[in-house]
Amino acid sequence: MARTLYIGNLPWSTKAEDLEEAFSKYGDVINARVISDRETGRSRGFGFVEVNDEDVEKFIAAMNGTDLGGRVISVNEAKARE
């Protein structure tokens, strides 16, 4: 089963491939995506990475508070939409 991580404070230039590359150092990445504005197409500064259940804590511990593209990112488990 997969779980989703929320990645915040991303640099505007970050692409999904950049997220996948950064996170794949610590385990298998199922899917990575950066959220963009519908009108402008510009990044909104956050994204999501899907990982296996057993790897969630490892990814959070390894990546939360690290530098990605010159910005310190926040990583935590995504909350379900209401």
Image (cartoon, grey):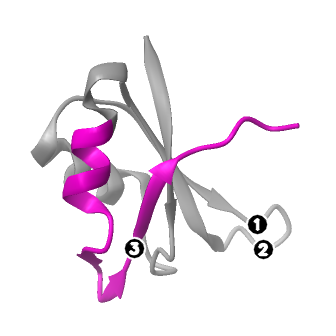
Residue 40, numbered circle = 2
- Point out the tag, 1 or 3, that comes first from the N-terminus: 1
Label 3 crowd (10 A; few <14 / some 14-19 / many >=20): some
Judged from this view, the residue extending furthest toward the left is: 25
Residue type for callout 2: Thr
Residue at 47% x, 74% y is 10
Disc nearer the start of the sequence (2/3)? 2
Q: Amino acid at mark 1?
A: Asp
For disc 3, the marked residue is 73
Q: Amino acid at mark 3?
A: Ile
Residue that numbered label 1 is attached to? 37
Is 5 drawn above or below residue 8 in the view shown? above
Q: Which residues are magenta?
A: 57-82
Residue 72 highlighted magenta (yes or no)? yes
CB within 8 Å, label 1 to label 3: no
Residue 34, image quadrant: bottom right
Mark 2 touches mark 3? (CB < 8 Å): no
Question: In percent of the image, x 39 and y 73: which residue is there?
Answer: 73
**Residue at the (25%, 74%) spot, across then down:** 66
Q: Which of the 4 quarters of the picture holds residue 26?
A: top left
Element type at mark 1: loop
Q: Is residue 8 above or below residue 72?
A: above
Along the line of sight, the residue nearer the viewer: 60 or 4: 60
**Pair 2/1: label in front:** 1
Q: Is residue 43 left or right of residue 14?
A: right
- Label 2 and label 1: CA atoms lie apart by 6 Å
Disc 1/disc 3 C-alpha distance (Å): 19 Å
Contact check, label 2 and label 1, Cβ < 8 Å: yes
Q: Which of label 1 and label 3 is nearer to you?
A: 3
- Is 35 situated above or below 28? below
Count of numbered tags: 3
Q: Using the numbered discs, state the Cα–Cα distance from disc 2 to disc 3 in whole angstroms.
A: 23 Å
